[in-house]
Image: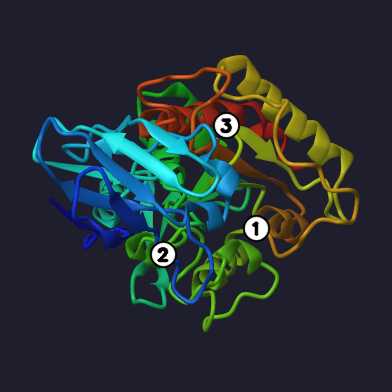
């Protein structure tokens, strides 16, 4: 028996692994940070024998409520991921599994590898509609990639989509993959019509360093990027700094920041109602956007979500608030679950990469419903 996390986005520390019924593990903290919750490791074991893996520090993780009603995901081939029996006793997370094969991967959610990220960017640039822009480098020297879809023109509206500011929220990049697959389909009428009057600016991964390092929430130096949008710097948060520069050059008419929520088993939107310049037009468009999503997919709901900020009390270091205020535009944070969609549960897979991709494609229809009215 052997356990390793020495690979892209790997995260686990082995405390004890002498017997299959008492494997003691711990999640490693993000570098220079106290955040931790993401895990991703590989077990070499005996097929047909139940292995009992205990994550000993689950109770003091960033979001301990996230373990309630949660099931870890596993895969033999790193393509197909399924939920496995998982228990949380208030202090420890216990995964029980009898593998069918000699080795199996476990993760907090279906990983989206840096290799796949690079493939996605290169695939997208094959489209005549897509321009691949290198914004700069991260602190670890990785590329900050921007995909510009559509021909920029002053009369066209600028629609910005960023994903995975928090690297452990890998469902966000699966969402973007689904959205791009539809947006770059030249036989999709919604995509074709949208690109007549709009340009999409898509950052598939805002935090490639944290993604590769196996972080939950921060970049290479322990900075939470979604608290850097008021005053980003090249020293602490070049990812945000570079994207804001590009936003300033293009303008922003609609902004979606894609995330995952550890605690809530639902898909939902968090708006920017608390910014000082919030308007009735923003509210009207936002309600239309939500209603369209409600009409086209049962995966979305509006009953559960974050508490709405009171007028003037928005945190302007958060991306959606900061962008809405600076560019006087409609902006949302879109959240997906790590667990399952409680409104439409799937015992075998829970909320998954495939469902994230489909939601990304569906959101394009919601964007279409309001695009013509994004400018007064």
> Residue 347: which numbered mark, if any?
none
| Residue position for label 2 | 210
Label 2 or label 3, whichever comes before in sequence order = 2
Task: Name the residue: 30% across, 48% down.
Answer: 120
Label 2 or label 1, whichever comes before in sequence order = 2
Where residue 264 appears, as percent x and y from the top left, is 61, 36
Q: Is residue 162 left or right of residue 177?
A: right
Q: Single out the mark in the foreground, 3 or 1.
A: 3
Describe the element under mark 2 as helix, strand or loop: helix
> Residue 265: which numbered mark, if any?
3
Q: Quadrant of residue 304?
A: top right
Looking at the image, which is closer to me, 111 or 347? Answer: 347
Looking at the image, which is closer to me, 121 or 138? Answer: 138
| Residue position for label 1 | 319
Above or below residue 137? Residue 61 is: above
Is residue 47 something one can see in this rendering? Answer: yes
């Amino acid at each position: 028996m052997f356990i390793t996390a020495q690979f892209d986005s790997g995260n686990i520390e082995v405390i004890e692994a002498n017997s299959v019924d008492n494997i003691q593990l711990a999640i490693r903290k993000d570098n220079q940070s106290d955040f931790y919750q993401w895990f991703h490791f590989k077990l070499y074991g005996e097929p047909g024998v139940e292995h009992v893996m205990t994550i000993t520090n689950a109770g003091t993780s960033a979001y301990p409520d996230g373990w309630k009603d949660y099931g870890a995901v596993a895969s033999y081939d790193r393509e197909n991921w399924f939920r496995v029996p998982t228990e949380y006793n208030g202090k420890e997370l216990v995964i029980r599994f009898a593998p069918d094969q000699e080795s199996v991967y476990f993760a907090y959610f279906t990983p989206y590898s840096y290799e796949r990220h690079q493939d996605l960017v290169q695939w997208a640039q094959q489209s005549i509609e897509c321009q691949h822009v290198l914004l700069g480098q991260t602190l670890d020297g990785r590329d900050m990639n921007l995909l510009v879809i559509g021909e920029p023109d002053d009369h066209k509206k600028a629609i910005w989509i960023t994903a995975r500011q928090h690297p452990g929220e890998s469902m966000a990049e699966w969402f973007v993959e689904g959205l791009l697959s539809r947006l770059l389909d030249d036989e999709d009428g919604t995509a074709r019509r949208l690109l007549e009057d709009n340009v999409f600016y898509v950052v598939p991964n805002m935090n490639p360093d944290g993604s590769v390092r196996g972080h939950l929430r921060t970049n290479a130096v322990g900075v939470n990027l979604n608290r850097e949008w008021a005053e980003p710097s090249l020293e602490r948060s070049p990812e945000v700094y570079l994207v804001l520069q590009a936003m300033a050059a293009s303008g922003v008419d609609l902004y979606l920041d894609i995330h995952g929520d550890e605690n809530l088993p639902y898909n939902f939107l968090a708006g920017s109602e608390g910014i000082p310049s919030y308007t009735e037009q923003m509210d009207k468009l936002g309600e239309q956007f939500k209603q369209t999503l409600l009409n086209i997919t049962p995966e979305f709901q509006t009953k559960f979500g974050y508490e709405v900020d009171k007028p003037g009390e928005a945190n302007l270091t958060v991306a959606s608030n900061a962008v809405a205020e600076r560019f006087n535009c409609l902006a949302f944070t879109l959240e997906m679950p790590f667990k399952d969609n409680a409104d439409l549960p799937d015992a075998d897979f829970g909320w998954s990469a495939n469902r994230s991709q489909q939601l990304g494609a569906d959101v394009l229809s919601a964007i279409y419903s309001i695009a013509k009215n994004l400018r007064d």
